[in-house]
Each structure stands twice: as structure tokens, then as C-alpha cells.
Image (cartoon, rainbow, N blue to C red):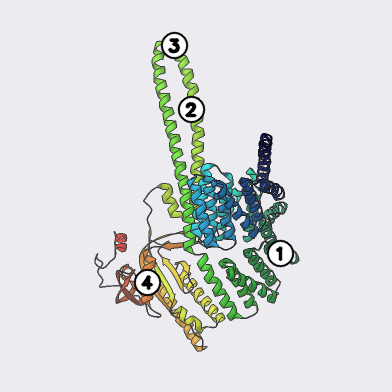
Amino acid sequence: MKKNLLALFVLLCFSATQAMDEQSIIKQHLQLANGYLSSDNEKSAEFANKALLLSEKIQYVDGQAEAYWLKGRLNFNAGKIKESGNDFLKASELFKKSGNTQMYATALKDYADFLRSSGNFNQAQKVIEQACAISIKIKNQRLQSECEISEGLISLSRNDFAKATGHYLNAMKISEEVNDNTGLGNAYLQLGNINTLQGNIEKSNEYFQKGLQLNKKIGNKLGESDAACNIGSNYLKIGSLQKAEEYISYSLKLSEGLKYNSTLALNLMNMGFLKVQQKQYADAEKNFKASHALYEKMNDNIGSIDVLNALGYLNSVNKKYTQAEDYYKQASVLAKKIGSSSALQTAYEGLAYIYEQKRDYKGAYQYAKMGRQINEKLFNIDNAKKVTQLQMNYEFSKIQEAQRIEQELKDEVNAEKSKRFRIAIVSGIFAVLSLIALLATATIAYRKNKIARILLAERNGILQIQKENSEKIIQGVLPAEIEKRLKTNSSASQERFVSVMFVDFVDFAKKESEFDPMDLMDHLDVAFKMLDETTRKYQLDAMKTMVDGYLCISGLHNNNEAESLDNLLKAGLEILQRLSDIQQKRAADGLPSFEMRIGIHSGSIIGGVVAVRTVSEDIWGNTVQIASEIEKFAQPSQLLLTETANNLRHSFKTNLVGEVTVMSDKSVKVYGVSSLGVELSGIKVSKDNIDEDVMKHLN
């Protein structure tokens, strides 16, 4: 019996020793798999599979969990989305079982990425919130940064650009604090993507270049391939074909070597677009079809839609309109199915072009209208302002930090000066006592003064560089006037006092249906050309053209308020007269036409430049809002101006029409314009009949 117990004990000790040795081998395999994860997928998969087999053999839970997690990452990068989801789910369950909280949260984050890629946004949001809560609890900032990126991608999938930007900026801030280059590189790439979507290519490429250089530095070839691919896409958008080909080819070579299918498919599609631009249509079709095959293999619906739209574009360029229409319709059906608004917009725009070429103008108009509605929803001024404001706040906080460092350097310089002064006094006292001491002290003081001057010159150079960088940041994101206020920190800048004219088509939505689509476009083209000609004639500034409205101002560059307001009134009356002539001509031909009405208000505005899909100048303020509302009270072919405008100097005879309420609670008197050449009389300018805006101006 004793011999049996002894043999069993020896066997258990041997088994335990063997298991410990096998665990060491598993850990080595996992370390190698992790090391190759971002540079060699095949080797990484080889070591992950070895670790998994050995872990299952000895029931080593931690080893199984990490091996499944690595397989999930590899499958996700290779475009095997469904397989990656199963791997991440198994890994999270095993990490939870083993008590490895950090890796449990990491696996949850990756599982959320799988759910988002599969279109299950609600479930993805729940899982990523759980992962984020754990990362905060265990104070793992690198994991917090990764969770912020994942949350941003979910928000972007829901077309919430501002929320996505906030998450990416948080990720960038956290990564900078903990010096996490991998997280910082990912944040750069995502901020570049969101600026591309908003049409800000210059800012986008700035982020992508930072991401490219950083990923090169840390040896992350996956991130390097993504950054180069995105830069190539941007150059393709702006027509810089030589640079586009350089970056796309570079990324294509990397993604092929890594077998990084998601980026490889995108590179093939970009190369197809490049070949179309170079009129190498056979090569373009070959690249598009290779890309489509990869996306279908990965079950990536969004990528498949993009390639279908690309094939539609290629066939439309070759004037194969039937094939092009088929591809665009396939893309629109799939885009509707998965709820991809941007892809659906591209398909609608393509179909509008095809129908126009086939002379089906009604169909072309309908598709163009649907595409425009999606575009206004996705890429509007509010979205652009929110994204720009968030980036501006982040950059401005960095400016403040630079100013704090500048002040600290100044304090150090002052302290050094004070120290030298005290040394000089002590040296002077000792100089009286001894000539030798004087010479020695003078020599020391000279040397210290020389060193201090060198130090001060170096610091001043640093301060100048920081100041220039700060100004570049301000110039990159702020309108000119606000930039000036920020740099001077002065309240001396004043808003401009101008007169605003708002021109609107009467009952545009109702009357639109009376027109043939092509005739509607011709009529609108004639009307807006007439508006532009008239505003140029009277030296007005045309600020905005809407579907059924037109906004212009006077007084922006002319301080003579009588002349500028007269020009605005002359322009308004001429617009109504010229439109009346157009109406008579169209009526004689039996064609419908629009009527216009005009509202004018004088007051203060603030103006600037905003970044939307293209950069445009804009104005804001109650003055614009009031002019818009006054126009709505006018009758067809009538020009109304507010009491504020009427009380300014002008050369027109006016008559009181009535009193209306604007901006919900403000009562305003409105006047009609009768004729030119009669001096205004009988109106007494006082605080009772002039609003606060004009009173400030007159004072």
C-alpha cells in the first residue's frame, strides 16, 4: 500500500512538472504570435494554433483564452468577420472564467468591433460600454483609448459625426498622456477619416501623414498600410493622380504581403478608380472585380456596395448605360438593406446621371432629388460646425498649455536675472576688499552672463516656434475675425452694420409639381443668373443660394449707408421688375413661372468661413433671421423693409404696411417701397421708433 502511494505521489509530481514546462512553451508561443500580429499574419497564426492545441491538451484556461483572442484578431484583419466574432466570444468567456479582468475587457472590446462590422449597432454599444467601464475601474488608460476608438466607430456608423469626433479626440488625449504610440496612431487615422467625410481633405491628410510616420516608427505595418491607403484615396479625390498612384501602390504592396484583405480590397478599388482616370478601362475593370471578389469573400456588404457603385461609374464612363444602371441599382438595393446612407447617395447620383444620358429627365430629376436629400442629412453645416468646434477646442487647449510653458520659461529667465543681480552685488562688495577677488568675480560673472545669454536666446527661439505653431493652429480652424480676437485677446473687434436682403420664391414646394423637370431647372437657372447679374450691378455681396431662396447684403465694403441701402433697394425693385418680364414671356408660351417676394432689414452681423464639403463664407445674427421672416409677410412681387432699415437715409418713398411679430416675441413695423426720387419726410428718428441695433450704430 505504501509503495502504491509513493508511486502515485511521484507520478503527480512528474505530471505537475511536465505541465509547468508545457505552460512555459505555451507562453513562448503566445509571445511570438503577439509579436508577429502586426507584421506577419501567417507566422502569428502558426504560433497561435500551436498554443491553442497545447493549452487544450493540458486544460490551461489562460492559454486557451489568449490563443482564441489572437485567432479572432487575425481573422478580423483577414476579413473573416463571422469567424472572428466566434473567437472573440470564446476568448471573453474563458478570460472571465480565469479571472483575467484586463484581457476580459479587451476581448469584449474586440467582440463589440465584430458586432459593429456585422451591423448590430445596439448590441455593439452595450458590449463596448461594459468594456469601457472595466477599463476605467482597473485604471488601464491604453484600453480606455481603444474603447474610445471603438465607440467612435459605432457613432460614425450611425452618422453621428460630432459624437464620433469627441471619442477620437478623447482617444488621442489619453494616448498622448500615457505615451501609447499604437493608440495615438489609431486616433490619427480615425480623425483623418472623419475629416475626409466632411470634405476637409487638407486636415484629413495632415492626420493621415502623422499616422503613417508614427506607424513606421513603431513597426506597425497594418497601420502603415491603412494610412498610406487613405492618403492615396485623398489624392485621388482631388485629382493628384501621380501622388495617388505612389501611395496606393505602396499600400497595395504592404497589404498583399500581410494578406490584410480589408485594406487590400480597398487598395484594389482605389487602383481601379486611378485606372479610370488614366483611361485604362480594361485594367480598371480588372481591379474593381478583384476587389469585389474579396469583399464578397469577407462578407463585407459596405465594401461590396462601394465596388458596385464603382463598376456603375466605369460603365457610365464607357457609355454602357444599361450595365451601369444595373450595377447602380444593385448597390442601391444592398445599401437600403443595411442602412448605408452615404453609399445609397452615391448610387442615386449615379442613376440620376444615367437617366439624364438616356433622356429620361423625370427619372433623372427624381434620383437627383433623393440623392440631394441624403446629402443634406449627412453633410450639413451643423455637422461640420460641431466637428470643427470639437477639434478647435482640443487644439486650443494645447495652445493654452504652450502658453503656460512659455510663462514658466519667462519666470525661469527672470529668476536667472535676479540671481545674476545678487551675484553682481556680492561681487562688488568683495571687489572693494581685494583686487584679486574683483578680477576672479568679474571672470565668473562674465562666463555666467555668457551662458545665460545663450540659454535666453535658445528659450526665445523655442517660444517663437511655439507662438508660430499656435497661430497656425488658430488659422487652420477659426474664421479670420475670431482668429484676430484670439491672438490679440482684445474686445476691440466690432461686428459690421449692414443691410440684408432675403429673396424667396413664393410657394416653391407647391408650384414645383407644375413644372416639367427640365423646364424647372431651366427656369431656376435663368432666375438665379438674373439675381447674380443684379447683385453684381449694384455692388452687393451675394452670401447664399438655397433651393428656393437668395441672400445678399450691402454695406460690407461701403461705409456710406445711404448709398449702400439705396443700391440694395434699387436691386430689389429691379429683381421684381425683371422677374415680371420673365413671367409675361413664359405666360405667352403657356408655361408656369414662380413669383418672388423680398424682405430687407438693417442691423449688425458677424461673418466667417465654415468648413463643409467645400469651404464657404457665411454670416450669422438676428439681422439675417429678421430679414428672412419679414420676407414671409410680403405679398407676391412685393418688397418690404423694416422700420430699422426705413429709418436709415435713403432716396425712396415708402408707406407703412403694418406691424408684424418676428422671432416669436419682437414687434416690428414694416414698410412698402413706392418709387424712386422722393425724399423721405415726416418721420422723426427717436428712441421710440428705432430699435436697439440702429441706436448703437447712430451713437
Amino acid at dot 4: Glu
**In the structure shown, which secondary structural element does the residue marked by tag 4 occupy?**
helix
Residue 435 badge? 3
- Comparing marks 4 and 3, which lies closer to the viewer? 4
Q: Check disc 4 and report the residue beneath it.
A: 629
Q: Residue at x 36, y 51 (%)?
A: 492
Category of crowding for the residue at label 2, using alpha-carbon neighbours closer than 10 angstroms: few (below 14), some (14–19), many (at least 20): some
Q: Earlier in the sequence, mark 4 or mark 1?
A: 1
- Comparing marks 2 and 1, which lies closer to the viewer? 1
Q: Are marks 4 and 3 in contact (CB under 8 Å)?
A: no
Q: CA distance from mark 4 to mark 2?
A: 66 Å
Q: Are marks 4 and 1 in contact (CB under 8 Å)?
A: no
Which residue is at the front of the view, 196 or 445?
196
Q: Horizontal and vertical percent for residue 284? A: 72, 64
Quadrant of residue 435 in the image? top left
- Residue 459 lies, with reference to residue 316, above or below; the image says above
Which residue is at the front of the view, 431 or 400?
400
Q: Are marks 2 and 3 in contact (CB under 8 Å)?
A: no
Task: Residue lying at the far front in this picture: please name it.
Answer: 1
Q: In this image, 82 relative to 653: left or right?
A: right
Q: Check disc 2 and report the residue beneath it.
A: 452
**In the structure shown, which secondary structural element does the residue marked by tag 3 occupy?**
helix
Q: Is residue 207 visible?
A: no
